[in-house]
Image: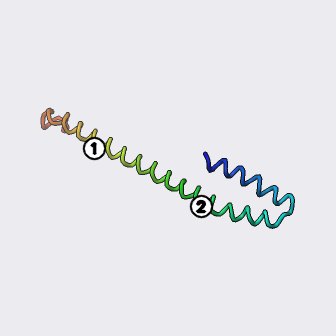
Amino acid sequence: MVGQVRFNKWYGQFFDAIGKKDLPDFTHSLWVFVPLVSVMLALTVAQTFLQERLKFRLREWVSRHHLGRMAQADAHLPDDFCRR
């Protein structure tokens, strides 16, 4: 959220510099933009990676948990139950 607020402030400064045709402010805005985008991109990639990793780990756990329960449930069935 802090990044979005900073982007909004940057947009204002950038377009003010364009509107005033102020080259030093314009170039300063571009130099502010590069690290801002770099940090936001790194955070977005990290967040996406962590979300996907969590989903994978949860699916893995659920699969193992339910397969274990199904194996225990099948243990008390007769051998020819699945062939019927």
Q: What colour scheme was applied to this rendering of the protein?
A: rainbow
The reply to whether the C-beta atoms of the residues labelled 1 and 2 are less than 8 Å apart is no
**Is 52 or 3 nearer to us in this picture?**
3
Is 22 located above or below residue 65 in the figure?
A: below
Tag 2, which secondary structure? helix
> Which amino acid type corresponds to the residue marked 1 in the rendered image?
Arg
Going by the image, does 6 lie left or right of 74?
right
**Is 29 or 42 nearer to us in this picture?**
29
* Label 1 vs label 2, nearer the camera: 2
Q: Position of residue 6 (x, y in %)?
A: 67, 51
Give the Cα distance between marks 1 and 2.
Answer: 39 Å
Please give the name of the residue rendered at 77% of the width and 52% of the height, measured from the top-left corner.
12
> Which amino acid type corresponds to the residue marked 2 in the rendered image?
Ser
Q: Position of residue 77 (x, y in %)?
A: 15, 33
Going by the image, does 2 lie left or right of 55?
right
The quarter in which the C terminus is drawn is top left
Is 56 located above or below residue 27 in the figure?
A: above
Disc 2 crowd rating (10 Å Cα; few below 14, some 14-19, many 20+) is few
Mark 1, residue position: 64
Is 5 located above or below residue 41 in the figure?
A: above
Q: Position of residue 29 (x, y in %)?
A: 73, 61
Looking at the image, tell me whether mark 1 or mark 2 is earlier in sequence order: 2
Task: Give the residue furthest to the right.
Answer: 20
The quarter in which the N terminus is drawn is top right
Residue 38: image tag:
2
Residue 11: image tag:
none
Please give the name of the residue rendered at 69% of the width and 65% of the height, measured from the top-left corner.
31
Going by the image, does 30 lie left or right of 16?
left
Tag 1, which secondary structure? helix
Please give the name of the residue rendered at 74% of the width and 53% of the height, measured from the top-left corner.
11
Q: Quadrant of residue 19?
A: bottom right
Please give the name of the residue rendered at 79% of the width and 66% of the height, measured from the top-left corner.
24
